[in-house]
Image (spheres, rainbow, N blue to C red):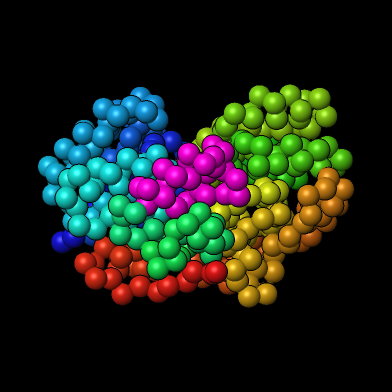
Amino acid sequence: MTRVLHVITGLEHGGAERQLALLLRHLPVACEVATLTRTGVLGAEIRLAGVPVHEIGMRGNRDLAALPRLVRLIRRGRFDVVHTHLYRACVYGRIAARLAGTARVIATEHSLGDGHIEGRPTTRGVRALYRATERLGSTTVAVSPTVAGRLCDWGVKPGRIVVIPNGIDAAAFAFDAGRRAKTRRRLGIEPAERVVGAVGRLVPTKRFDLLIEAVARLDGVRLLLAGDGPMRDALERLAHRLGVSAIFTGGTSDVPGVLAAMDVLAAPSVQETFGLGVLEALAAGLPVRYTTCPALDDLPPGAAPDARRLPGDVRSWSAELDRALREERDRTRVPPAVARYAIAAQAAELARLYLPEPSVREVVPI
């Protein structure tokens, strides 16, 4: 059986990290994982599922001592494929894979935004290092046509890019009234309280400050923010100053539970490479209000009738959230968009890339 080593920067809570954990349950190949930094909560869960996880012990972006350790791991494991995820892991992983003599080197680009990659500015140096190491790989996977277009703008040759979207396990997010009640009790939310929620890293581009301001205009509405990040303290202060009753859960492995506890999902982010959180909310039967979501924008009209795109102003968000909270809804109803991104289909596409001469689709917008 084909042996694949997935190399990722870390395994704390995050969209790319959760996507890898999900893929590992569906890829029809033998997988192991190397995390450059800490194993984290997700790493422990992956180990419990029976997938070996190796910690490289990297201490920072310039810790070059991690490179020979990664090379030794790849050689020792005799992997047929090295598959890298996230910027630092792509840079170090591609170099290590080539030094170890691995024939197939695949990279998934999860987080290339407009002017930033994983929160760091896309300076000339960042772009040059990315392009130089990208040439050491076999194929770069973009999680959306939007990301593929940005890669082309960076100078990556279109023939080296394949679009394979993120996947979702819809059954894991299906609405469950018992889970809703249990999660609300745990978080101190009354059964009849109206809850606006959001899931994501607490960084400026997610625009959770706008969401707090919008909820402040609504009476008797709780705000539930699941995620962590550098803006947490500032957002908590803003919620307190505006009198918003807000719950900050921090990073959580129970995303289905927090989605079940919500009544509407708000995603005011101005930059997204895919929009996995929006799809998860739709799978949970939630109405969604969003600003940017390539996963939906790439689909035909009508694929997600419960999702509405909004401009980035507080008045529009406040009015739409209020409208969504007042609508009666059948939480067992799931739009066609969710089935379009079934994890089994995306895992099968990735598995074809692992073959020596893969037959893959080329979907690269120019």
Q: Position of residue 284 (x, y in %)?
A: 58, 57
| Side of 362 relative to 251 (left or right) | left
Q: Quadrant of residue 210?
A: top right
Residue nearest the viewer, comparing 172 with 51: 51
Q: Quadrant of residue 137?
A: bottom left
Tell me the residue at 34%/54% (across/down). Answer: 135
Q: Quadrant of residue 331?
A: bottom right
Residue nearest the viewer, comparing 65 with 190: 65
Residue 262 can be seen in this image? no
Residue nearest the viewer, comparing 212 with 118: 118
Q: Position of residue 213 (x, y in %)?
A: 81, 38
> Considering only vertical position in the picture, is 320 above or below 253?
below
| Side of 343 relative to 246 (left or right) | left
> Considering only vertical position in the picture, is 67 above or below 29?
above
Residue 9 can be seen in this image? yes
| Side of 115 relative to 164 (left or right) | right
Q: How many marks?
A: 0
Task: Give the magenta-colored segment's residue range.
Answer: 109-134
Q: Is residue 98 magenta?
A: no
> Considering only vertical position in the picture, is 60 above or below 97?
above
Residue nearest the viewer, comparing 363 with 283: 363
| Side of 296 relative to 49 (left or right) | right
Quadrant in the picture for the C terminus: bottom right
Tell me the residue at 20%/44% (across/down). Answer: 99
Tell me the residue at 42%/72% (across/down). Answer: 362
Tell me the residue at 47%/57% (across/down). Answer: 155
Q: Position of residue 125 (x, y in %)?
A: 48, 39
Quadrant in the picture for the N terminus: bottom left
Q: Position of residue 275 (x, y in %)?
A: 58, 55
